[in-house]
Amino acid sequence: MAHKIIRNIKRVDPEIVRTLGELGVATVHEAQGRTGLMKSYMRPIYPTARAAGTALTVSSQPGDNLMIHAAMDVCQAGDILVVTTTSDSTDGMFGDLLGVSCQAHGVVGLIIDAGVRDTSELTAMDFPVWAKAVHAQGTVKSTGGSVNVAVVCAGAAVNPGDVIVADADGVVVVPRDQAAAVARAGAERVAKEEKTRERLRNRELGLDFYGLREKLKQLGVVYQDSE
């Protein structure tokens, strides 16, 4: 397959990206029909990490970070790097020097289905990263790959320009053409949940307002006063 770097991609309105980021991973995932989650091994390098941005995708050879450097040539402010490798890898393909370059160009975070290193420095920089592994194993810069092509990252399909939302709950992908609709659905879900939260504060039971007593009955679950 020919390697290529696509310079120009369509991006979602930054206001929609901001809204999705404020909603958070769990709400966005529910709002788009429980789709788009990356695998649960993708964890932030520090607990308070949050990011939302447009996907700038990178396909690299394992143990080779040349194409991450190449991606910096076509990134824009508000992008989030989504890096995959052509076969399984936990090598530390990204460290604090690339983090400095990302911040200088307005890149808001990194999602990498491989390893990262220099996590103390990246944390001190407040540069959010979600990775498969933390590993000091170094890499080379010697093999071609592609930037801004369709990839699969941690089990989720990602196209250039899709919206990535990431926080302590994981990482979710919102297809670019669905982003506005998901943002609206997510806002509606938040409003509905606030009403539910108030009912729970008032000691109402979910068993009642979700109609779950009938479900228990259908499943043959019975109450009894003692064993």
Image: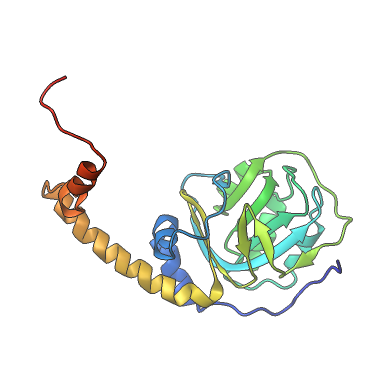
Q: Relative to the observer, which residue lies in front, 90 or 178?
A: 178
Quadrant of the rendered structure where residue 67 is? bottom right
Query: Residue 116 placed where, x, y %?
Result: 68, 46
Query: Residue 144 placed where, x, y %?
Result: 86, 61
Residue 49 located left or right of residue 8: left
> What residue is drawn where x is 75% and y is 43%?
91
> What residue is drawn where x is 48% and y is 55%?
50
Query: Colour scheme of this structure image?
Result: rainbow
> What residue is drawn where x is 23% and y is 44%?
218
Query: Residue 109 placed where, x, y %?
Result: 59, 59
Residue 110 located left or right of residue 73: left
Counting labels gives 0
Q: Relative to the observer, which residue lies in front, 86 or 16?
A: 86
Residue 125 located left or right of residue 169: right
Query: Residue 38 placed where, x, y %?
Result: 56, 53
Q: Residue furthest top?
A: 227
> What residue is drawn where x is 85% and y is 50%?
140
**Rendered-image quadrant of the N terminus:** bottom right
Q: Residue furthest right?
A: 142
In the displayed structure, 30 sits above or below 140; it is below
In the displayed structure, 107 sits above or below 49; it is below
Quadrant of the rendered structure where residue 194 is? bottom left
In the displayed structure, 142 sits above or below 220; it is below
**Rendered-image quadrant of the C terminus:** top left
